[in-house]
Structure formats: structure tokens, C-alpha cells
Image: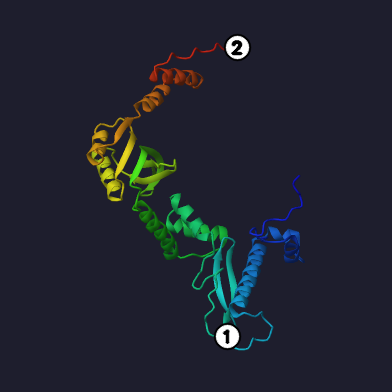
Amino acid sequence: MSDVNAKKPANVPAVLKPEAIDQLLAGINPSDLASPEAFRQLKKAILERALGAELTVHLGYPKGEVRPTGQGNQRNGTSRKRLITDEGVIDLEVPRDRDGSFEPQIVEKGQRRFTGFDDKIVSMYARGMTVREIQGHLEEIYGVEVSPDLISQVTDAVIEEAREWQNRPLESLYPLVVFDALRVKIRDDGLVRNKAVYLALGVQIDGTKDILGLWIEQNEGAKFWLKVMTELKNRGLQDILLAVVDGLKGFPEAISAVFPQTHIQTCMIVHLTRYSLSFASWQERKHLSGALRAQSIGRPAPRRRRPSW
């Protein structure tokens, strides 16, 4: 029988004990916890305490105790740092040491934004909001004044990371690659339009799926896919065993021009099935889909059950 009171493994740390939480909230009115200001003050206290603990580890002795013999470095007051967080602006008192060798980790030198704030900027940017709209939203919701340059720096960093991902080296062999397109809403010149995002989904030997790339093009054609194949080859892809594509004219030729040994499977059945189902009512689609699927593999169509009245 397992012991319900068994201790946790040694490698599982206890982040916060209930006693520590009780001490942390001692003297706080529960109704005040609903205020954003209360959370800001709580986060400020926790961060400053953590920074003090980091300095204690760095110096080798806690605050208030006698400096060990041979230790030339010591505490040297604090400096104020304004930090932008999800709850708003926090003014931290960051402890310093005499010789300036202290490098805090929880809030690093030069850091002005805390974890999660950049993600909010990127999320709003991805939804099509302009820099000025993001600036106004952050000021309205969080009471944070953010410059347009800061927003541009955050979004530019994400765009640069996306470029690195788009140009990353690929595996030399993928047993299966599916080439397809997704219809998504994209803001373009101030208007939201439906655009096609073309993708290449590769399946590795161990079954792991990998998005090889994403492309946005006005017109899908054999010339475009030939450019995609050339790009994949330049990134290290040497061979594809099976490529699944739609029935675009010239698509198989574009693949064979770059990967001549690749076997090509068209997915016309899927497209034709979807197109056929668009003419049927919702009540008829399930039966029609089964009939079309059976037709495609050469089996008799399933008999339709009569509704029970």
C-alpha cells in the first residue's frame, strides 16, 4: 500500500509554504487584494526581498552581520529603478555593492520590463493593432506610458526572430511533407483581408511534425512552388519520400524539378469531397461524406438509416 504521507522527492522544490503565504498576507485587508495597487505593492515587496537575497549570496554574508575577514566588498545602499509590469509601473529599490560586481538575475541590469509585458505587446501587434493603438491601450488599461520606439523595438525583435526561424537549417530527409494553404485574416494597409498562408508540414522518421516554412503569396502557381522547393533545398533538405499536394497544374513538375526521386500524391479526393458537401444540407452531409469516402476507395456506399418518427 502506498503511503499517502510520503515525502516529495528531493528534486521537487517547495516554492512557497503555506506559512510563508500567511506571513506575506498578514495585516492585509482581504478586500484590498482586489485592487491593482495591492498587487503592485506585493510584487514590489517580493522583488526587493529577492534582490536583497541575491546580494546576500553574492557577498557571502547577510545584511546586519559583521563582514567576514578578507571580504573587501560590502553593501552600498540602493538605486531606484522603474520597472514596467503587467500590473503597471513599479519603482524598485535595487541594492548595490561597493565595487559594482553585483549582477542581479531576477531583474537584470538595464532591464526595464518584467516578464510577460513584451508578450502583451506582441499579442496586440499580431491582432493587427497599430503602434499608436497599442500605446493607447496600454495607457488606458495598465496606466503605463510606453513610447512608440519601445513598441517598435519589441515587435522588430519578434520579426527578426521569425526571420531566423524561417531560414533555419532543416533535416536532410523527411519521409512525408504536406504542402497546403490556410486562409487567415491579415491586416494590410489598414484593412483586414483574407489571405492565403502557404505552409510545408514535414513528418520526421520518428513521427515528429515540423513546420518547414510559411509563405504569403498573392497568387499560388507552379513558379511560386518552384521557388519554395529551391528554398527548402538551400536550407539543407536533400530528399522527400512522399509529397502530398493539391491538384494545382504544374505543382508536381515543380517538386520533381528539385526533388526528382520524390513520390507525389495528390489530395484531389479531399478537395472534391469538400466541394461536393457544399451542395448538401447539414442533415445530409454525414451520409454523403460516407458515400463519397466509400466511392473513393472502391467500397459499396453505406446504407442510410431511415429516421425514426
Q: Is residue 197 visible?
A: no
Q: In what element is the residue under mark 2?
A: loop
Looking at the rendered structure, the kind of residue marked 2 is Ser
Closer to viewer: mark 1 or mark 2: 1
Q: Position of residue 236 (x, y in %)?
A: 30, 50
Residue 209: mark: none
Residue 308: mark: 2
Q: Is residue 239 left or right of residue 84?
A: left
Q: In what element is the residue under mark 1?
A: loop
Count of numbered labels shown in the rendering: 2
Q: Earlier in the sequence, mark 1 or mark 2?
A: 1
Q: Position of residue 211 (x, y in %)?
A: 40, 45
Q: Position of residue 192 (x, y in %)?
A: 40, 44
Query: Do the residues under discs 1 and 2 have CB atoms within 8 angstroms?
Result: no
Residue identifier under label 1: 73
- Place residue 1 in its image quadrant: top right
